[in-house]
Image (cartoon, rainbow, N blue to C red):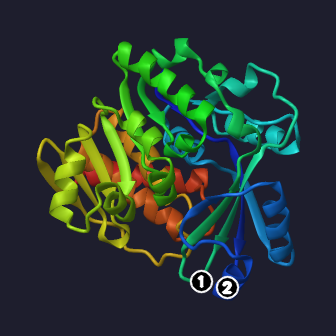
Amino acid sequence: MTYHLYAIGNALVDTEYEVTEAQLEAAGVAKRHMTLIDAPRRAELLKHVQTVRSHRTGGGSAGNTVVALAQLGGRAFYSCRVADDELGDFYTKDLTAHGVASNLTHTKPPQGQTGICMVMVTPDAERSMSTFLGATADMDESALHPHDIVKAQVYYMEGYLAASPTGCAAALKGRAIASQAGVKLATTLSDVSMINFCRPGLEAMVGNDLDFLFCNEEEAQVWCGSQDLAQITQQLGSQAHTVCLTRSAKGCLVIEQGQVTEVPAAQVKAVDTNGAGDMFAGAFLYAVTHGHSHAHAAWLANQAAARVVAQYGNRLSQAVMDGLKADFVRFLAA
């Protein structure tokens, strides 16, 4: 085994803006959700935030997940696509700096624009995302490293790839390779917009032999077409061996084999929910690939997600992650 986690997803550089409700409304951005935008819309949105202080980091949902796992001490590989521009160089160097292996160091990137995600954060801590996919919209099977997939413990597919025909096909090709090699399979529902507009792709990623499924409460409700928690847990439980249903301040539910385990959240004052679900998945998968129970893994994942929402930005510093690991050791010993 070479990697604890092999993931495929969109390479996006996150630029985050703290805005008021009025600014969000004036920009015409759908609150709490991810909306795909084109280049003209991106230019329009940039005008709305030109006076707003911004913060830039490596991003993309699965990108955040692999970095979180690597920061905790796991080994990760990330398949993605950037362009031959300044943002692409920034993204590639960011993965390398975090110790994440990727296909980007093996191939020359194409001409074009690297994808970006404009994240607008309102005072209630909600994040509203406008994503220009750029080069990642054309990611295909050439991004896969089959010889590395078969040497991983878990193969993870970012649900946002359901919006890209070639990206979704690549994720499913990797899924087939992983499944044949006995590698565990994981995916996330990512966002309500993906469920509403790209459901067939998501359903193919989930398939009928998924090991780990990640979603939040709103996504679960839309996916199952129900507000009834008992019905939701039963339905989700039939779609993966282990389901992690996150519920913000209520913590999370771990659903497996008809059993539902409640794991409490860490209590923090939320300022920015961007990256919380990605961090949860990364911390959870780190713990399970290092021999810990799913309930213990969910405890660590809740703690990590809480640290993210208590600050601005989608990533945590290495110092904070080291502190989390120490807390986990103390929790396990208690």
Answer with left or right where residue 219 lies relative to residue 8.
Answer: left
Residue 190, image x and y in percent?
48, 52
**Residue 178 position by quadrant:** top left
Let me know if residue 155 appears in the view.
yes
**Residue 9 position by quadrant:** top right
Q: Which mark is residue 253?
A: none
Q: Are marks 2 and 1 in contact (CB under 8 Å)?
A: yes
Question: 10 Å neighbourhood of mark 1: few (<14), some, or many (≥20)?
Answer: few
Question: 10 Å neighbourhood of mark 2: few (<14), some, or many (≥20)?
Answer: some
Q: Which mark is residue 123?
A: 1
Q: Give the residue at x 54% y 11%.
A: 147
Mark 2: secondary structure: loop
Q: Which residue is mark 2?
A: 20
* Location of residue 326 with respect to 72 vertically, above or below: below
Q: Amino acid at mark 1?
A: Pro
> Quick one: quadrant of the N terminus?
top left
Q: Give the residue at x 63% y 41%.
A: 10
Q: Amino acid at mark 2?
A: Thr
Q: Looking at this view, is 92 or 30 the one in front? A: 30
Q: Looking at this view, is 269 or 19 the one in front? A: 19
Give the Cα separation between the discs numbered 2 and 1. 7 Å
- Which comes before the other along the chain, label 2 or label 1? 2
Residue 82, image x and y in percent?
76, 36
